Amino acid sequence: MTVEFLLKGGILTWPILFCSIAAWTIFFERFLCYRAAAKIHPQLINAIYQLVGNGKFEEARARLQVKDRDEARKTPPAERILREGLAVDPTDRESLELVLSHSVNRELKLLERHLGTMATLGNIAPLLGLLGTVFGMIKAFMAVQELGGRVNASVLAGGIWEALLTTAYGLVVAIPIVFSHNYLENRLEELQAIHEEVAIFLVKAWLASRSE
């Protein structure tokens, strides 16, 4: 598709192109973020569960200790959840579950950032295309009125197909965005299940330490 052909869609071609660029930027940024969030160190996490189950809370905290905030931010969400759960010394199960629930929800809020914006871009693109087509049709029929009876079918058809280009552009942009957004939503659900499982196993380990 040449640039000249692209420009025939009118001025609304540019907002549609912006929607595409912005949406794909969000997609690749979230894709990399989710891949990093899915990294879990099983040996470390299993060691934490074992230490907590044996009542060795201080040693478990030491295994999860970080030097500064920057290092804490770079660690996988699963380890941050465990660190926050072990940062307090709850005397009952409800308190521990409350802390872990807050931690899991916070991590999910961070992970779902910009997904709403991506969905909005996917919805706006075809609407912009439709709007461009409406404007183009208006211009085409205004030209027909100005020419009066001298207009022929080729002139009218040329104006109409140029007007329909923006609708085509909007759909071409929106359809991949919708599929990509659904993919990210599914990945987010998988990460939610993983992090909730991490929290549940910590609660089970804590209960094991209390039963001894």
Image (cartoon, grey):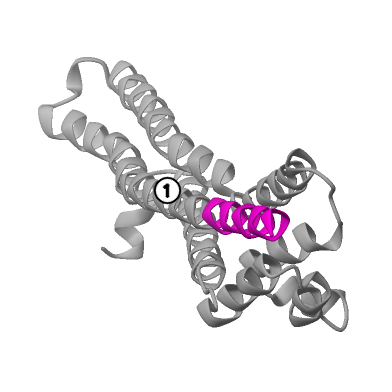
Q: Nearer the viewer, residue 74 or 54?
A: 54
In the image, residue 58 above or below residue 180: below
Q: Nearer the viewer, residue 166 or 102?
A: 102
At 11% from the left and 28% from the top, the residue drawn is 153
Relative side of 97 to 108, left or right: right
Q: Secondary structure at mark 1?
A: helix
Residue 92 percent coordinates (x, y): 79, 43
In the image, residue 166 above or below residue 49: above
Q: Is residue 198 magenta?
A: yes
Residue 73 percent coordinates (x, y): 76, 71
Q: Nearer the viewer, residue 31 or 195?
A: 195
Mark 1 = which residue?
181
At 51% from the left and 77% from the top, the residue drawn is 42
In the image, residue 133 above or below residue 10: above
Task: Say what amino acid the circle numbered 1 marks.
Answer: His
At 19% from the left and 24% from the top, the residue drawn is 151
Residue 5 percent coordinates (x, y): 29, 56
Q: Which residues are magenta?
A: 195-212
In the image, residue 100 above or below residue 75: above
Q: Quadrant of the C terminus?
A: bottom right
Relative side of 108 to 91, left or right: left
Residue 122 percent coordinates (x, y): 44, 41
Relative side of 18 to 138, left or right: right
The residue lying furthest to the left in this view is 153
Relative side of 168 to 69, left or right: left
Predominant secondary structure in magenta?
Answer: helix
Q: Badge 1 local density, few (<14 within 10 Å), some, or many (20+)?
A: many
Figure disc tally = 1
Which image quadrant for residue 89?
Answer: bottom right
